[in-house]
Image (cartoon, rainbow, N blue to C red):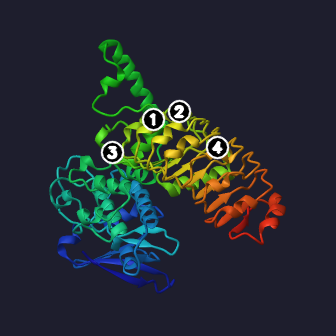
């Protein structure tokens, strides 16, 4: 497809890249020079000049410092975060290309054509087989592309369009995560179901089943949604359904959309659509909901995974005013997610946990910063391992004595005054009880498996009961407990850590 040379300008000493075409079939069909002339983006090389005769065409562009993804992969595997960063950057570049008039389709997205510098910034190169999109064309005149990365339509099935590049991004993401370009083989090695679904949607054989554009794909990758568009769409839908109900009684709005699931909470719907890679308005079936195992929301923000949730938590702790409280008050929607294993809905308006009672696969529940008082519905969660109720109104958790797998509990910031509130939770290994009115460690011996306990910012002034815990490895306290710590430090078989300010 042409040879790329590193050339040096004699007068300035500047280095450039020269793509030289000698094949006669390419001389009349390459549009690289024409396209580069009108493109100005930090993720693309800049056009310098063109030189040609009857036997050769040379397109000179800026030389991009860095190494191709193909080269980098020979030395190390990319981790998931790197794969995501690269794909998101690529979506930004493609959005710019596809929004040109007419749209520019690259048609040769592959590791060799993506250069990454030392800071992780990527540049998309090689526009040798790129083309502009024309609605009047039914198929491409010439079929080009790299095997595996090229979409089916690049082999003559139909005209290529922006979704052809989406296909290539899906293959690239699979390769970044697994080292495989074979989708069937690669998907079997991807444990993150959300990313697997995104790759499947990108690489659908029929272009209409793929993401519509790079911006939509970027939203699916990052989990970000344009909330106003979502709420506007939802509001219009509700208005239409209500209007229709006047003419179609006795049918209710819910019955009118029986082909798909209807959600009670817009924010939960947004999180589900993020997980499934579904746009607003696309139907969601109950069968599709069975693939969802994790949901994360902090305030009015949807997080794509646990890491993103923790980032929002850090933002909240450091800049609490920047994140608005979410408006989730009902959990009925969660009852539809039969295979849910982890749910984190922080900083909402949740009080009733009853809908969770049937989610027997739940292992991790995080409902910090909610006005919850009663946790009794959670007693049916036989798989529950971790429960976070920080800054709630819970004062008694003894109803959870049937949760024998519960090993991690955070009840910091609650009105708990005595460890009797935790009666029956003998399997606890990690107990966070910071910022509570707890005054005494009486009955702590009822938790013989405790390994770590966090007591900072409590009125506790006697730590001697901790000496009875055979498995205890660490206790966190604050400076006000210095005297209590001094009294036991010679006998303590565990580390005493002071809370960092």
Disc with the residue nearer the chain's start (2 vs 3): 3
Disc with the residue nearer the chain's start (1 vs 4): 1
Quick one: SS at disc 3? Answer: loop
Q: Residues within 10 Å of mark 1 (few under 14, many from 20)?
A: some
Q: Please say if the residues under marks 2 and 3 sit with CB atoms less than 8 Å apart.
A: no
Indicate which label's residue lies in the foreground, 1 or 4. 4
Is residue 334 visible in the rendered structure shown here? no
Indicate which label's residue lies in the foreground, 4 or 2. 4
Indicate which label's residue lies in the foreground, 4 or 3. 4
**Closest to the observer: 296 or 170?**
296
Q: Residues within 10 Å of mark 3 (few under 14, many from 20)?
A: few
In percent of the image, x 34 and y 18: which residue is there? 244
Against 228, residue 242 (above or below) is above
Q: CA distance from mark 1 to mark 4?
A: 23 Å
Q: Please say if the residues under marks 2 and 1 sit with CB atoms less than 8 Å apart.
A: yes
Residue extending farthest to the left is 156
Q: CA distance from mark 4 to mark 2?
A: 20 Å
Residue 376: x %, y % from top left: 53, 37
Q: Which residue is mark 4?
A: 421
Q: CA distance from mark 4 to mark 3?
A: 35 Å
Picture quadrant of residue 93: bottom left
Q: Which residue is mark 1?
A: 355
Q: Which residue is mark 2?
A: 352
Q: Residues within 10 Å of mark 4 (few under 14, many from 20)?
A: some
Against 11, residue 466 (above or below) is above
Q: Which mark is residue 290?
A: 3
**Closest to the observer: 147 or 268?**
268
In percent of the image, x 41 and y 72: which residue is there? 115
């Amino acid at each position: 497809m042409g040879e790329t040379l590193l050339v040096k300008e004699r007068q300035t000493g500047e280095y450039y890249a020269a793509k030289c075409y000698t094949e006669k079939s390419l001389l009349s069909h390459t549009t690289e020079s024409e396209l580069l002339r009108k493109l100005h983006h930090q993720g693309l090389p800049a056009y310098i000049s063109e030189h040609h005769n009857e036997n050769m065409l040379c397109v000179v562009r800026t030389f991009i410092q860095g190494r191709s993804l193909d080269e980098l992969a020979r030395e190390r595997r990319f981790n998931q975060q790197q794969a995501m960063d690269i794909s998101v950057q690529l979506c930004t570049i493609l959005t710019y290309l596809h929004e040109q008039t007419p749209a520019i389709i690259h048609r040769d997205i592959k590791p060799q054509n993506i250069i990454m510098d030392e800071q992780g910034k990527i540049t998309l190169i090689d526009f040798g087989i790129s083309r502009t999109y024309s609605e009047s064309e039914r198929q491409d005149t010439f079929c080009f592309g790299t095997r595996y990365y090229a979409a089916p339509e690049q082999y003559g099935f139909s005209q290529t369009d922006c979704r052809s590049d989406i296909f290539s991004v899906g293959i690239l993401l699979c390769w970044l995560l697994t080292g495989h370009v074979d989708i069937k083989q690669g998907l079997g090695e991807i444990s993150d179901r959300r990313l697997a679904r995104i790759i499947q949607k990108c690489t659908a054989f029929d272009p209409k089943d793929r993401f519509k554009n790079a911006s939509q794909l970027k939203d699916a990758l990052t989990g970000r949604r344009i909330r106003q568009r979502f709420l506007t769409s939802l509001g219009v839908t509700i208005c239409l359904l209500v209007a229709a109900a006047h003419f179609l009684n006795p049918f209710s709005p819910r019955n009118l959309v029986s082909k798909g699931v209807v959600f009670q909470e817009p924010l939960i719907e947004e999180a589900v659509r993020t997980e499934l890679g579904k746009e607003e308005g696309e139907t969601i079936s109950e069968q599709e909901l069975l693939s969802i195992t994790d949901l994360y929301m902090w305030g009015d923000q949807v997080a794509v995974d646990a890491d993103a949730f923790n980032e929002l938590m850090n933002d909240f702790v450091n800049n609490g005013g920047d994140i608005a409280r979410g408006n989730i008050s009902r959990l009925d929607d969660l009852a539809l997610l039969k295979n849910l294993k982890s749910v984190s809905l922080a900083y909402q308006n949740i009080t009733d946990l009853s809908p969770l009672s049937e989610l027997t696969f739940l292992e991790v529940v995080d409902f910090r910063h909610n006005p919850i008082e009663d946790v009794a519905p959670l007693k049916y969660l036989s798989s529950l391992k971790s429960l976070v109720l920080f800054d709630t109104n819970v004062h008694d958790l003894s109803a959870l004595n049937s949760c024998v797998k519960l090993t991690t509990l955070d009840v910091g910031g609650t009105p708990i005054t005595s460890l009797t509130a935790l009666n029956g939770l003998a399997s606890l290994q990690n107990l966070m009880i910071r910022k509570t009115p707890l005054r005494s460690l009486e009955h702590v011996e009822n938790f013989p498996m405790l390994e770590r306990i966090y007591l900072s910012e409590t009125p506790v002034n006697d730590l001697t009961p901790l000496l009875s815990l055979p498995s205890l490895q660490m206790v966190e306290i604050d400076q006000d407990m210095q005297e209590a710590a001094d009294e036991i430090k010679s006998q303590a078989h565990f580390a005493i850590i002071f809370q960092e300010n």
